[in-house]
């Protein structure tokens, strides 16, 4: 499910950040890790934006019910 995938992606991103911060990877590996991190970040951001839109739609629907 999307929640599990999001959490998995977030953990993977955290691991990449730790590896980059450690300084134990060479320049080529660092660039590859950075690119992977950017891709994961974009996917996570897209998931969050989608969730925010759904929440707004639900909130707006709830407000409409309250005014009736």
Image: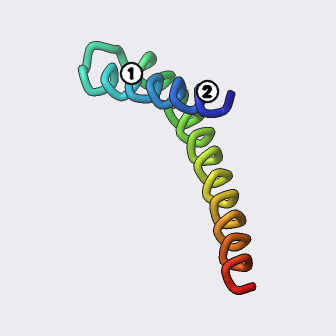
Q: Is residue 42 above or below residue 29?
A: below
Q: Are marks 2 and 1 in contact (CB under 8 Å)?
A: no
**Residue sitting at x 68%, y 60%:** 53
Seen from the viewer's position, the closer of residues 39 and 60 is 60
Q: Is residue 28 above or below residue 42?
A: above
**Residue sitting at x 69%, y 86%:** 67
Q: Could you say which quadrant of the image residue 15 lies in?
A: top left
**Residue sitting at x 35%, y 15%:** 26
Seen from the viewer's position, the closer of residues 38 and 27 is 38
**Residue sitting at x 63%, y 59%:** 55
Is residue 27 shown left or right of residue 56? left
User: How far from the left and from the top, in percent, is residue 29?
Assistant: 44, 16
Q: CA distance from mark 2 to mark 1?
A: 15 Å
Task: Looking at the image, tell me whether mark 2 or mark 1 is earlier in sequence order.
Answer: 2
Image quarter of the C terminus? bottom right
User: How far from the left and from the top, in percent, is residue 17?
Assistant: 36, 28
Seen from the viewer's position, the closer of residues 57 and 24 is 57
User: How far from the left and from the top, in percent, is residue 42?
Assistant: 59, 42
Image quarter of the N terminus? top right
Which residue was labeled with disc 1? 15
Is residue 50 shown left or right of residue 27? right
Q: Is residue 68 above or below residue 18?
A: below
Furthest residue toward bottom: 67
Which residue was labeled with disc 2? 5
Label 2 crowd bin: few (<14), some (14–19), many (20+), radius 10 Å: few
């Amino acid at each position: 499910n999307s929640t599990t995938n999001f959490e998995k992606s977030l953990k993977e991103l955290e691991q990449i950040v730790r590896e980059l911060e450690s300084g134990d990877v060479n320049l080529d590996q660092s660039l590859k890790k950075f690119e992977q991190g950017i891709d994961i970040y974009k996917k996570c951001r897209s998931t969050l934006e989608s969730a925010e839109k759904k929440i707004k739609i639900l909130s707006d629907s709830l407000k409409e019910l309250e005014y009736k």
